[in-house]
Image: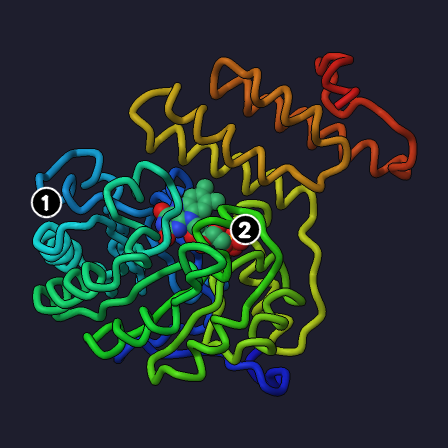
Amino acid sequence: MDAVQPLAGMPLAYSVRNIRIEPNLVLAPMEGVTDLTFRRLIRKIGGAGLTVTEFIASEGLRRGADKMEEMARIDPDEHPVAIQIYGRNPTAMAEAAKIVQDLGADICDLNFGCPSKKVCAHSGGSALLKDPELAEQIVRAVRAAITIPLTVKMRSGFDSTQRNCPDIAWMCQEEGVEAITIHWRTRADLYSGTRAVDKIAETKARLRIPVIGNGDILDFESAKAMFADTGVDGVMIGRGAIKNPWVFQQVRAQMLGHELTEVTPEEKRRVLIDYYESCRAWFRTDRGALGRMKKISNYFTHGLPYSSELRTTILRSQTVEEAITAVNLYFDHLAEWQARGGSTRERLVPDATDAALAG
Ligand SMILES: Cc1cc2nc3c(=O)[nH]c(=O)nc-3n(C[C@H](O)[C@H](O)[C@H](O)COP(=O)(O)O)c2cc1C
């Protein structure tokens, strides 16, 4: 595969100090998604050059809260991996960063991007974009506490009147941060807004350290557009990886000039069932496992024929077994339906209700 020439103008790797991120495609941190089970799934499929944990409250981590320690767990062979922390107290952030380093993370990542009210109310996450002095104190304290590379992930600004990521990113670089990720949305955009990557381009043009572009990258075309429009060193993919965990592998192959290979329904079934099994093994209760399975299935099954029936059935499942049975039945029927030409409208999940079919 590597004998193929990469497409002109597209970088294939970047380095954070001595850590090579190759391919330059990063799994985004996602709370309630990118725990060990999901990161394992992504690594098994391959194609991501770096994985990042979901964000972890610095205060909880330094107090040794079980939940935070569990969230920060990484596999011994999961490298390179970044652990992301958030908070607003420089001392707590520094102590948490030291724990992150001791846990074996390659990179400590700071969250300056979370738009949630809970996080912003305590001046963490994207609220730090409005408080550059506090942001600087945090970066300085954390930088002094650890020797591993430090990176920061942020939104482009707090709202459309304050798209100040180039300034914040510059400050971070001057304080010793070694790479920056920018999601093009502002905090006020939440998850909507019209694509505007100009501030990512401006940041990239100003900084010496790698800049990674993020926001709505779903496939090779959108990754290519991010590289072309901003000149970034790498791209980060979040929701696109829940819908399609093969996205890294596919984008990488296309960056090397290969054709896109479609994932077969059988492979989708295998990966989904495998994921369900690892949730069952990882979560302490069946309820916890089922909750996570429902969340991931909701994204993962989009785009499959007549999958709203499947989603409804999974959402109504009371046990892990029920959800596994629904997935297996769906894929069995899908295979039969496709073998018949796949043109007629049919129920692919036999026990779905008419209401579900209408949806
Ligand atoms: C369910 C969910 C949880 C998220 N949790 C985090 C988080 O813990 N830390 C963080 O920096 N960003 C978090 N984000 C933002 C993503 O990392 C990413 O910046 C955003 O989704 C845009 O990228 P995308 O369009 O590829 O999804 C989260 C996003 C989603 C959808």
Q: Is 139 drawn above or below residue 68 in the view shown?
A: below
- In front: mark 2 or mark 1? 1
First in sequence: mark 2 vs mark 1: 1
Crowding around mark 2 (Cα neighbors within 10 Å: few <14, some 14 to 19, many 20+) is: many
- Residue 199 position, x and y percent, is 48, 71
Count of labels in the image: 2
* Quadrant containing the N terminus in the rendered view: bottom right
Viewer-nearest residue: 194 or 279:
194
- Residue 13 position, x and y percent, is 44, 78
Would residue 229 appear left or right of 160 to someone viewing this image?
right
Q: Residue type at mark 2?
A: Pro
- Residue 210 position, x and y percent, is 38, 77
Report the Cα–Cα distance between label 2 and label 1: 32 Å
Element under label 2? loop
Viewer-nearest residue: 187 or 252:
187
Q: Residue type at mark 1?
A: Arg
* Quadrant containing the C terminus in the rendered view: top right
- Label 2: which residue? 245
Please name the residue shown 17% across and 55% down the image.
100
Crowding around mark 1 (Cα neighbors within 10 Å: few <14, some 14 to 19, many 20+) is: many
Please name the residue shown 57% across and 48% down the image.
192
Element under label 1? helix
Viewer-nearest residue: 293 or 335:
293
Please name the residue shown 70% across and 28% down the image.
308
**Which disc number belongs to residue 43?**
none
- Residue 120 position, x and y percent, is 31, 44
Instruction: Residue 40: tell me if it is visible.
Output: no
**Which disc number belongs to residue 62?**
1
Would residue 64 appear left or right of 154 to someone viewing this image?
left
Viewer-nearest residue: 271 or 238:
238
Would residue 167 appear left or right of 182 to someone viewing this image?
left
Q: Is 107 drawn above or below residue 311 in the view shown?
A: below
